[in-house]
Amino acid sequence: MRREVRISGFGGQGIILAGYILGKAAAVYDNKEATLVQSYGPEARGGAASAEVVIDEEPVDYPHIEAADILVLMSAEAYRTYGKSLRPGGTLIVEEDLVPLEEGQKAIKVPATRLAEELGRRIVANIVMLGALVAATGIVSKEAIVESVRTSVPPRTVDLNLRALERGYEYVKEKVRVL
Amino acid sequence: MPKEAVVSTHPLDEVLRTDRLPHIWCPGCGLGTVMGAFARAMLASGIPLDQHVVVSGIGCTGRVPGYLKVDGFHTTHGRAIPFATGLVIANPELKVTVFSGDGDLVAIGGNHLIHAARRNIDLNVICVNNFNYGMTGGQLGPTTPKGAITTTSPYGFPEDPFNLPHLLASLGAVFVARWTTLHVRQLEETMIRAFHKRGFRFIEVLAPCPVGFGRPNDMGEGLDEMWFYRRQADYDPQAALEMLEVSMHKDSKVICGVFVDTERPTYMDNYHKYVLSKVMGGKSGAA
Amino acid sequence: MSKRVLTGRHFMMGDVACAEGALAAGCTFFAGYPITPSTEIAERLARRLPEVGGHYIQMEDELASMAAIIGASWAGAKAMTATSGPGFSLMMENIGLAVMMETPCVVVDIQRGSPSTGLPTLTGQSDVMQAKWGSHGDYEIIAYAPASCQEMFDLTIRAFNMAERFRNPVLIMADEVVGHMTERVVIPPEEAIERWERPRPMVPPGEHFLPFAAGEDLVPPMPRAGEGYRIYVESLTHDERGYPVMSPEVHDRLVRRLNEKIRRAYDQIIDYELSEVEDAEIIVISYGSTARSARQAARIARKEGMRVGTLRLITLWPFPGRVVEELSARIRAFVVAELNLGQMAREVERFTDRPVFRANHAGGMMMPPELILASIEEAYRDAKGSRRQYASIR
Ligand code: SF4
């Protein structure tokens, strides 16, 4: 079944890398079909960044998405731009400290930047979110996302990134139990 | 006449495509003289003829490679230098000479000229400057002297021309010289010297084009222009580069000599140092 | 593992896959000028070519880039450049030179919204006629239109092979969507990659050799500069010796041979993909990223009970006219979908007496499947006679 994921935030958060790792997990390690497209242009330099990932068992013809099944938002601006673009019944995951949710909007809230800082490097917040995303949706297998992280980040940072992935994953597993 | 001089010179048969002679150039044209000097310089250089490649663009000068019995390429207007750049990078063993005219090299090819000089590509450039576009009937070019009459400057050329040795020296060419077609022996020796240097070398050769430039500008026939050079040419390799503009006025000087002869790392030297040394097992040459 | 071929399963951007395809094909020389959306090809090769002993040079412009790869090819290199519309326009001059000098080389155009500077970061397909007719004169060109990242890899290899085989420039006419999208790319083991080499002289240097005399296949053998053949290679009309000849007979003979060597090899060069055409009444013709939208549109149309098939052009030039001709006999109409205002549709019309409907958009976004669907519905409704409808003009 075709599932559409949008990951959005601001430049420098590693949004595109998160999309890449997710798509690669599906296409290379889970043997599914996947496409990644990213927003380009001046806005991609420091402004908004957005990655669109489509995952399916069938070949993906059309790589763009209008309404996401899974929406991961990591900035207030991303929320303003895409906050309404979730398909009914879809999953919204937000960076708790950066996205001011509207009253009554349901979302999985992950303090990814804080969790990343606890691990020592705030730049792995994107990978924390990825762990949260996989835990919340099961869109790719745990093994695939681990392999994908391992083969996509600089060799020196593999351990840190795997810890970040695990942290996000655990956080949601615990939270989902609470919810 | 240059035509007869070339055809009858038996020792050059080895480097000329004799089956293509007589050449197409006009009586009194300076190109045969330059080509003859180049042919003799190739033979005297001691470099195997199979290693020589001559590349040209479009124009009367662009026809030179077609008469030389070495590998030759007659490319598009202005693009001889980038073509030759690809050739010599892909096979650095080649001795590549770009042989073309002022319009081809400096007008339409000007951007390539300045960048190849900046990069210090291993190219020997011979620029035959006859102050106009001869092949198409005598239009102005970037070396046309101020005030000169051409078919597209019927009232006199209102612009300042390039001073080529000055330009090339400022771009970092490692060898910059100028002669006229009167200075056959010096030209030949300079060409031999240039063959044995590495990096971007530039030889400007002032040559008569009686059809396009000489007659409309009271310079007369080819021979008259040679007399002019005889009277007005000075050998002064120490001359200040800014003073090397050629105005072709009756009483103006034409300063000749080798103005720059220096060394700096070539493009390939730098490529080895800055690029290939940083990758494992990198070797030079793309072919 | 050889560094030249990155055997394995990758999640790779189209532009990067193109660069890797070039390396796998044996590319040793790249000259280019950065331009969005092709720049990732240059960036990848700037890093990768030195690793395998090749050479990357960034030239002062696209005129120089194109000239440099032709020069490099004559030194024996397998050479490539990559660009987008504005740079492609500048390359036209020396694409003609490569045709005239019969020089193998590959030119990649990652198309963006045009004319002029247009939409640098957004997609388009409006250079496809320029690919065929952009340089002056009568010439045949080979052009492929990849529709996926895997094809960016595969077709780049094929482009090199065809360039070598026919001594002709070969174009990859991709678009920004395919260039910037990331998908799975499977790179086979090096031994499984077919590499063709240009025909080479059969006689040693020094013996009588006519560098532009061709045999049965009309492709003359190609020496390299410096090998001792003392060749003369001309941009002017030339005879079999390579010597310039200003005669109408020689000119006609040369230009006909240059064209004929490609036309004669139609079957070797042409590639396309047919889907669900057996019972189709309407066939959607498209290429590049638009073919992906067409597939989606056809699927929806089928669900709605319309018998729709698709023809995806993999080879754009020479135009696969024969398949259009064959299909014409059994369908009601074609819909040609493309991100321009109807360029290849004209070519389709030359090969069919069926009505040709159009689904066009000037570019800036991937072709929306709905736009194609609308043209399919229109064709279904209206294609009784030969009246032409212009979906884009309504
Ligand atoms: S036009 Fe001028 S440069 Fe050309 S051949 Fe005649 S004299 Fe020489």
Image (cartoon, coloured by chain):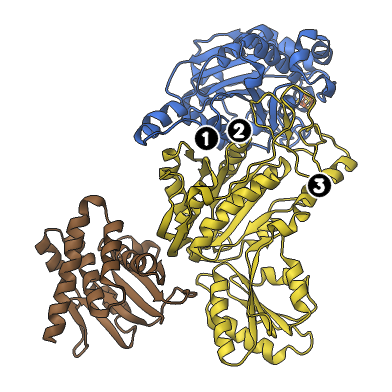
Chain colours: A brown, B blue, C yellow
- Looking at numbered disc 2 in the image, what kind of residue is underneath it? Ala
Q: Quadrant of residue B253?
A: top right
Residues beneath discs 2 and 3 located on the same chain:
yes
**In this picture, residue C130 sits left or right of residue B222:** left
Residues beneath discs 1 and 2 located on the same chain:
no
Residue that mark 2 sits on: C75
Task: Estimate the spatial distance between the alpha carbons at disc 3 and disc 1, rounded to whole Å.
Answer: 30 Å
Q: Are the residues flagged by discs 1 and 2 in contact, CB closer than 8 Å?
A: yes
**In this picture, residue B244 sits left or right of residue A170:** right
- Ligand 1, by image quadrant, is top right
Residues beneath discs 3 and 1 located on the same chain:
no
Residue sitting at the far front? C191
Count every numbered label the image shows and give the total.
Answer: 3
Residue that mark 1 sits on: B286
> In x, y percent, where is residue C5?
46, 48
Quadrant where the C terminus of chain C lies? bottom right
Residue at image coords 66%, 24%: B129
Query: Which badge, 2 or 3, comes first in the chain's sequence?
Result: 2
Regarding residue C88, the answer to whether it shows in the image is no
- Looking at numbered disc 3 in the image, what kind of residue is underneath it? Arg
Q: C81 or B124: which is nearer to us?
A: C81
Secondary structure beneath dot 1 equals loop
> In x, y percent, where is residue C287?
60, 68
